Structures are given as C-alpha cells and as structure tokens.
Image (spheres, helix red, strand yellow):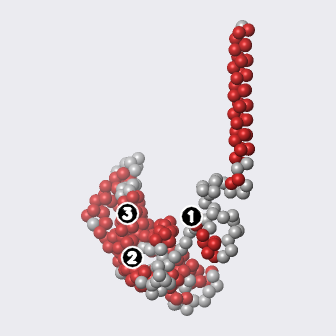
Amino acid sequence: MKKYFSGYHLAKLLCLLLLAGILFSRKTTALAATDTPYRESNLTGTTEERTNERAPGAAENADDLAEMNIANTVTITYGNGNGSVNGALRILVILTLIAIAPTLIIMMTSFTRIIIVLHFTRQALNTQTAPPNTVLIGIALFLTFFIMQPTLASIYTEAVVPYEAGEMNEEEALTKAAAPIRQFMYGQTFKKDVSLFMDINRLEWSGELEEIPMSVLVPSFIISELRRAFIIGFLIYIPFIVIDMVVASTLMSMGMMMLPPTTISMPFKILLFVLADGWYLIIKGLVESFNL
C-alpha cells in the first residue's frame, strides 16, 4: 500500500515538474524575442517578412505613398482613357449584377405575369405538382427571355456597344440602358396605377413617360402585372369550374355524396385540356398579351 501511494505521488511530482519546465521555457523564449531589434516597433515579423516597408505615416508625397505597402493596394484603372474598365472591376460589376439579377428578372420583366398564370393553370387542373415548380419556372424564364429579347437587343445596341467603344461614360450608358426597360414597363402599365404612386409622392404628371421616376414606374408596373395575371387566371378557371359543377351535380343525383367530386373531375379536366391543346392556347395568349 505504501509503495502504491509512493508511486502515485512520484508520478504527480514528475507531471508538476514537467509543466513548470514548459512554462519556464515559453517565458524565456518570449523574453528573448522581445530583446531582438526588429521587435522594437509594433510591427510583427522580421524585416524580411514584414509587408510594411516603412513605418506608417512616413510617406512625404504621393510617390512614397504608392511605394509603401504596395502588396495591399487595390487600383481601378481605365484603358488608355477610352472609357473601358479593367478586368478586376468588370468581375466586380458582373458579380453585383448576378446578385441582384433575380429581383430584376422578377420585378422588371414579363416573368411575374407568366409564372402566376402558369400557377393558376396547374391549380385549375388540380394536378397538385404536375408540372413541378422547376418546370414552371423554366418555362417562365425562357418565355421571359423570348418576350424581352427586343428590349435586351435595344439595350445592347444603344448602351453596351457605345460604352465599350468609349463613346459615353457610365452615367450616360446607364441612362441609355434604362430607356428600353422603361418603355417596356410603361407599355404594360395602367395609367391609374402610375397616377396612384404619383399622387402618393405628391408629383404632378401630364401623362408623359419622361416625367415618371423609376421609383414610381416599377411598383406601378408590378401592380399592373398582378392585375393582368389574375384576370387571365380567372378566365382559365371558368371551364374547369363548369366541369367541377357538372361532376358534383351528377354525383349528388346518384347519391354518391361520399365520393369527392375532384377525384372524378380531374381526368375530365385533363382530357378537356389536352383536346383543346391547352398549353398552346395559354402560351399563345400569354405572349400576345404583351403586344409584341
């Protein structure tokens, strides 16, 4: 028993000595590092390792400032003054546009009307998830690209090409690029919606597009698109509601009140939709509703 306790105490003592040795060696190393000449300043690392060539605030002119800490400098340059930005800034602009692209596509193009009408069509057919959301969004995106193609071509011709050629600056290019989009939105917007937001902003409006700010035109366009989409959706619902009513009346007259009418009416809805070539009629009506 005594040998056991003696061994235990001996192991404990060795552990304490080892810990004390480690702490003492780290303290000695820190003191030695403090005594080195290159640690007299607040900068880290040796002279060869530091990215700062001179102490902060030592620059006397612009050339000295450009030479100091050059590894951490970000520059924005123009190619020979022709108005084109360098590759790094182009990447930054492209990434920014990608981040806000979903909002622009949904709120400033034909996407909103198309996706709502397609959703109403699926609900009227009562097919639940057929077509799935991915298919509906894909159809809406391709139809949006098809409908907006003249507008996009106008933006490229009137804004992008002259800007790349150095014939206009960024502000002029943005103004030229916004003009076709404004023209498209204004053509699909009800005047009473524009008047609503102009009155809210206490702005006078004589009916001209140039007097409408972008902050008024975008919400007016969105409200008009929602109105048109719901009107088209109601018209799509009418024939399918008739089928539901006929099936429900037939089941009640036969005393089959426990059988859900939607279970019987859904095959007839699909049959009617196929026989009438429903997808052709809906897509055709959607595209023509934009007065292309």
Which label belongs to residue 71? 1
How far from the left and from the top, in percent, is residue 57?
70, 68
Q: Residue at x 72, y 27 (%)?
A: 17
For marks 2 and 1, the one nearer the N-term is 1
Label 2: which secondary element: helix
Q: Which residue is mark 2?
A: 148
Instruction: Say whether residue 209 is visible.
Output: yes
Q: Residue at x 67, y 71 (%)?
A: 59
How far from the left and from the top, in percent, is residue 133?
41, 58
Nearest to the observer: residue 233 or residue 5: 5
Residue 35 vs 275, above or below: the answer is above
Q: In whole angstroms, how far apart are the C-alphas of marks 2 and 3?
A: 15 Å
Q: Residue at x 61, y 60 (%)?
A: 51
Q: In whole angstroms, how far apart are the C-alphas of marks 2 and 1?
A: 45 Å
Residue 136 vs 22, above or below: the answer is below
Quadrant in which residue 66 is drawn: bottom right
Q: Residues within 10 Å of mark 3 (few under 14, many from 20)?
A: few
How far from the left and from the top, in percent, is residue 172?
50, 85
Q: Which residue is at the far front?
A: 37
Q: Quarter of the image for the C terminus: give it.
A: bottom left
Q: Residues within 10 Å of mark 2 (few under 14, many from 20)?
A: some
How far from the left and from the top, in percent, is residue 96?
51, 68
Residue 260 vs 187, above or below: the answer is above
Q: Is residue 58 left or right of residue 289?
A: right
Circles 3 and 1: CB atoms closer than 8 Å: no
Q: Is residue 126 left or right of residue 182?
A: left
